[in-house]
């Protein structure tokens, strides 16, 4: 009996400790950091066995980071599950040792360090840290062009612009620490917030969110009343894997914009038979294909095509299907029956066959591919919005709007649809990943984006015939497709939890 009680007590303690650790952002970031860093260390060590000094040095640097991070996480576990339940100042100071790893592209080590050195972390602080990381990552990726024989005409302009923005991000972190940790952001932070909003021009969504959150909090006169959309973002950032997915998506969006300045498009499309099937190196990080085109540069420019097709082919059916679903759910009766039966006919045609038929009829082009992917998604979004509208249409705020003389179009667009968007937003986030995968699949089959355009499916197809002799030509674009689909899925899962009122 005593043994059973002791066992139950031990299980209870383990559950309590697990709950404490799961609620610690420092533990979550540090655990993922040392796991990823260990994986990189083992990979670099394997590459070093081929006699490369550079790979050996990388393995040594990452190995040292792994040992530091492993020691730190052991201290975090001991202190969080201890009597005090708090991380000591000594352990937090160790986080400063992890920050320099951003210079070699270790996003996870830098994140773990930033979350460790700061005891109090509001949403503005986290956004400022991720904004800085995106900018530094773009500088690191763009700097690889220095090893090429020639750079684009606007290379130094782009590098200078992003270097200035990186410095500005460092200043922003200081301003966040000084002005935003009260209930209401200080008025002195508002100029910084406006400049942060302008960061959207560089694709830096983290900077944009930081700016609108600061302004939203400042404009909220009653400090005790929270702003709903800010609460959604705050809950989203409690899910670290969702943040990782969001970071990857925003980085690819930013690097797609930066590539116009810092990358030379000719390297991605022009034949260079002197570099035919070149192995990965500093000049060609992912090697070259059979025509001597840099695979790394083609993947960078391919991100632009994949994101554009994925986003547009998801937004188009949301708008069309959302309006049809809202009208059907609001009016009901014959209107609902006609709209939904027509959509049933469209839904009865397999989306892949429909897309192939459209492309076969109109030819292969990016616009036709977007059209083909968009039409097949309309019925799904229409059904989702219709179900939401039918649950919202009879609520009191809708009846109040009607009683005030609001027209049906106003009621639908201003009152019903905004309150029905939560599941649509989640579906759209995951739908973009699926659209990117479909884009690559169609291009791989030769019926998507024209073969001469650097798109991930085209890059993968070009490398598939060299899987035995030069597998890296196909491995890297394949990994790019996998990573972006996983990123959208992780982001979508986190957004779904953040929008769920039951999990508030």
Image: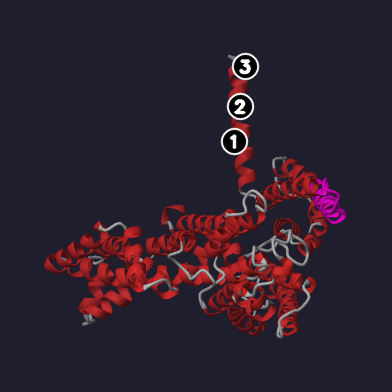
* Residue 64 seen in render: yes
State if disc 2 and disc 1 touch (CB < 8 Å): no
Secondary structure under tag 3 reads helix
Q: Nearer the viewer, mark 1 or mark 2?
A: 1
Q: Along the horizontal axis of the image, is 265 left or right of 233? A: right
Which structural element holds mark 2? helix
Residue at mark 1: 15
Q: Earlier in the sequence, mark 1 or mark 2?
A: 2
Residues at badges 2 and 3 in contact (C-beta under 8 Å)? no
Q: Is residue 137 left or right of residue 433?
A: right
* Chain part drawn in magenta: 48-68
Q: Is residue 71 left or right of residue 226?
A: right
> Residue 116, image x and y in percent?
74, 56
Q: Nearer the viewer, residue 226 or 381?
A: 381
The residue pinned by badge 3 equals: 3
Kindly identify which numbered label has been placed on residue 9: 2
Up the image or down, 215 lies above or below 83; here it is below
Residue at 72% of width from left, 47% of height from top? 39
């Amino acid at each position: 009996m005593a043994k059973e009680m002791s066992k139950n007590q031990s299980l209870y303690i383990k559950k309590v400790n697990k709950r404490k650790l799961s609620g610690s952002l420092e533990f979550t970031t540090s655990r993922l950091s040392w796991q990823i860093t260990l994986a990189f260390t083992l990979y670099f060590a394997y590459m070093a066995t081929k006699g490369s000094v550079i790979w050996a040095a990388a393995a040594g640097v990452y190995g040292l980071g792994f040992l530091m991070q492993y020691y730190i996480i052991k201290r975090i576990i001991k202190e969080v599950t201890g009597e005090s339940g708090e991380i000591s100042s000594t352990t937090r100071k160790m986080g400063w040792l992890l920050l320099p790893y951003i210079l070699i592209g270790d996003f996870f080590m830098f994140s773990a360090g930033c979350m460790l050195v700061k005891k109090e972390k509001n949403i503005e602080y986290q956004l400022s840290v991720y904004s800085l990381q995106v900018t530094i990552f773009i500088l690191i990726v763009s700097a690889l062009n220095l090893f090429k024989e020639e750079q684009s005409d606007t290379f130094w302009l782009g590098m200078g612009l992003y270097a200035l923005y990186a410095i500005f991000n460092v200043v922003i972190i200081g301003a966040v620490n000084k002005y935003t940790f009260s209930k209401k952001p200080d008025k002195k932070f508002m100029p910084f917030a406006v400049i942060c909003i302008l960061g959207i021009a560089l694709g830096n969504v983290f900077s944009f969110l930081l700016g609108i959150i600061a302004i939203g909090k400042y404009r909220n006169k009653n400090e005790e009343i929270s702003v709903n959309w800010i609460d959604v973002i705050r809950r989203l950032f409690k899910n670290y894997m969702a943040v990782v997915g969001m970071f990857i998506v925003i980085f690819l969006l930013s690097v797609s914009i930066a590539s116009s300045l810092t990358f030379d498009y000719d390297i991605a499309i022009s034949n260079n038979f002197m570099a035919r099937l070149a192995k990965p190196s500093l000049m060609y990080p992912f090697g070259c294909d059979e025509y001597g085109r840099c695979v790394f540069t083609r993947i960078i420019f391919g991100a632009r095509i994949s994101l554009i097709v994925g986003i547009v082919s998801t937004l188009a059916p949301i708008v069309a299907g959302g309006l049809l679903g809202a009208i059907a759910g609001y009016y009901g009766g014959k209107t609902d029956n006609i709209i939904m039966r027509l959509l049933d006919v469209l839904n009865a045609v397999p989306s892949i066959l429909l897309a192939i038929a459209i492309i076969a009829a109109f030819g292969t082009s990016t616009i036709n591919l977007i059209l083909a992917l968009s039409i097949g998604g309309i019925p799904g979004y229409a059904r989702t919005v219709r179900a939401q509208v039918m649950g919202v249409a009879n609520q009191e705020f809708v009846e109040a709007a009607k009683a005030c003389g609001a027209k049906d179009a106003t009621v639908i667009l201003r009152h019903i649809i905004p309150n029905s968007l939560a599941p649509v937003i989640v579906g759209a986030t995951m739908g973009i990943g699926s659209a990117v995968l479909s884009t690559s699949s169609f291009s791989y089959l030769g019926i998507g984006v024209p073969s001469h355009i650097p798109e991930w499916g085209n890059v993968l197809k070009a490398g598939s015939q060299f899987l035995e002799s030069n597998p890296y030509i196909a491995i890297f674009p394949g990994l790019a497709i996998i990573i972006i689909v996983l990123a959208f899925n992780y982001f979508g899962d986190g957004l779904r939890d953040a929008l769920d009122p039951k999990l508030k």
